């Protein structure tokens, strides 16, 4: 079956229901030199899969801060790549993260939605703040300055034409640079996963927030979606706010009991808290 895991030992990339195997001789084209693109290129190289990494001009829509928050599963990815020891020397351990929420009403003005502890004991820290620039440097990828002029999807490959006349065949094209990419409409059946700009997800007790509604709010450039997942739990997901990300199909302010019964929401989608892009750093 298809998988969402893109870890260094997975030896496969999801392209809808088709898996790209490491035995393929065709390389992968990664469009977008954000942290996601750099890390994916390093993972592929670690698996013995060739890839080309190119800029697309939308990198700032992904890397909106100078630092990344890496939780334990993202750290494990860099550890398997053999670069975590280098990164850790300049990384800052985090004691906790507080998720604040500012509802669209007069009161309360703000509320601590959840407090996420990162320190297990004096020897174990589960999250670090790391410079985005150092993350990219540690992956040691060459970024090509090519510009795509044409993409032709074949049955088992993609033929990509670049400005200047160069043409190269790839097994697949991974769009890792956000939703503003002009070529995304050509990959409705071939892209590995839609990029949703998800930053973090956490499961909390239902009594920690409004027990009667599904809420979609915005704060500090983030889209926040609160979803009921059981009679006692809520899942809170933080997204980067972009104009072209559609609103939740469930709408705003719908009773939790109706959603639980209608959608049969019984189990949590997220068992762990995870940071950066979960489609690449998946628990």
Image (tube, grey):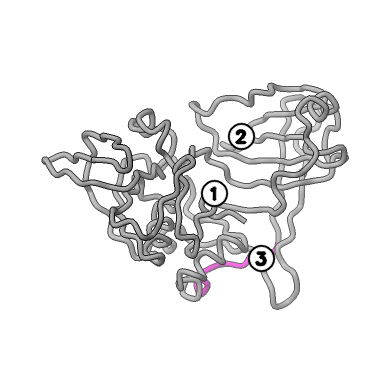
Q: Which one is in front in this view, the residue at disc 1 or the one at disc 3?
A: 1
The Cα–Cα distance between marks 2 and 1, rounded to whole angstroms, is 23 Å
3 with respect to 31 (left or right)? right
Q: Main secondary structure of the magenta part?
A: loop
Q: Earlier in the sequence, mark 2 or mark 1?
A: 1
Rendered position, 9 above or below 218: below
Question: Which residue is under mark 1?
Answer: 4
The Cα–Cα distance between marks 2 and 3, rounded to whole angstroms, is 25 Å
Q: Which one is in front in this view, the residue at disc 2 or the one at disc 1?
A: 1
Part of the protein shown in magenta: 88-95
**Which residue occupies the foreground of this view, 259 or 222?**
259
- For the point 62% across and 67% down, which residue is it? 93
Question: Which residue is under mark 2?
Answer: 223
Tag 2 and tag 1, C-beta contact below 8 Å: no
In terms of secondary structure, where does tag 1 sit? loop
The Cα–Cα distance between marks 1 and 3, rounded to whole angstroms, is 23 Å
Residue 72 lies in the magenta stretch? no
Question: Quick one: quadrant of the C terminus?
Answer: bottom right
- Report x, y in % for residue 13: 45, 51
- Report x, y in % for residue 113: 77, 43
- Report x, y in % for residue 32: 36, 46
- Report x, y in % for residue 108: 80, 32
Question: Which residue is under mark 3?
Answer: 126
Rendered position, 232 above or below 273: above
In terms of secondary structure, where does tag 2 sit? strand
């Amino acid at each position: 079956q298809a998988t969402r895991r893109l870890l260094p030992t997975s030896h496969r990339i999801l392209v809808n229901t088709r898996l790209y195997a490491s035995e393929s001789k065709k390389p992968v084209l990664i469009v977008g030199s954000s942290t996601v693109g750099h890390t994916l290129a390093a993972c592929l190289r670690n698996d013995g899969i060739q890839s080309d990494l190119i800029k697309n001009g939308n990198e700032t829509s992904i890397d909106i801060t100078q630092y990344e928050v890496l939780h334990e599963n993202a750290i494990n990815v860099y550890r398997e790549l053999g670069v975590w020891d280098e990164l850790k020397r300049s990384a800052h351990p985090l004691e906790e993260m507080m998720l604040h929420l500012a509802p669209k009403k007069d009161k309360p003005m703000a509320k601590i939605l959840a407090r996420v502890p990162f320190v297990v004991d004096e020897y174990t820290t589960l999250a670090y703040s790391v410079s985005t620039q150092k993350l990219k440097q540690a992956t040691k990828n060459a970024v090509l300055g090519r510009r795509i002029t044409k993409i032709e999807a074949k049955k088992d490959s993609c033929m990509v034409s670049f400005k200047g006349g160069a043409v190269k065949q790839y097994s697949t094209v991974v769009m890792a640079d956000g939703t503003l990419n002009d070529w995304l409409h050509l990959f409705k059946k071939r892209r590995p996963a839609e990029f949703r700009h998800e930053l973090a997800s956490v499961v909390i007790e239902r009594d920690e927030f409004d027990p009667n509604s599904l809420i979609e709010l915005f704060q500090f450039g983030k889209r926040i979606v609160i979803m009921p997942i059981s009679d006692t739990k809520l899942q809170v997901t933080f997204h980067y706010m972009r104009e072209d990300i559609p609103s939740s199909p469930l709408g705003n302010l719908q009773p939790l009991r109706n959603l639980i019964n209608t959608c049969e929401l019984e189990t949590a989608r997220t068992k762990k808290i995870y940071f950066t892009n979960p489609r690449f750093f998946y628990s």
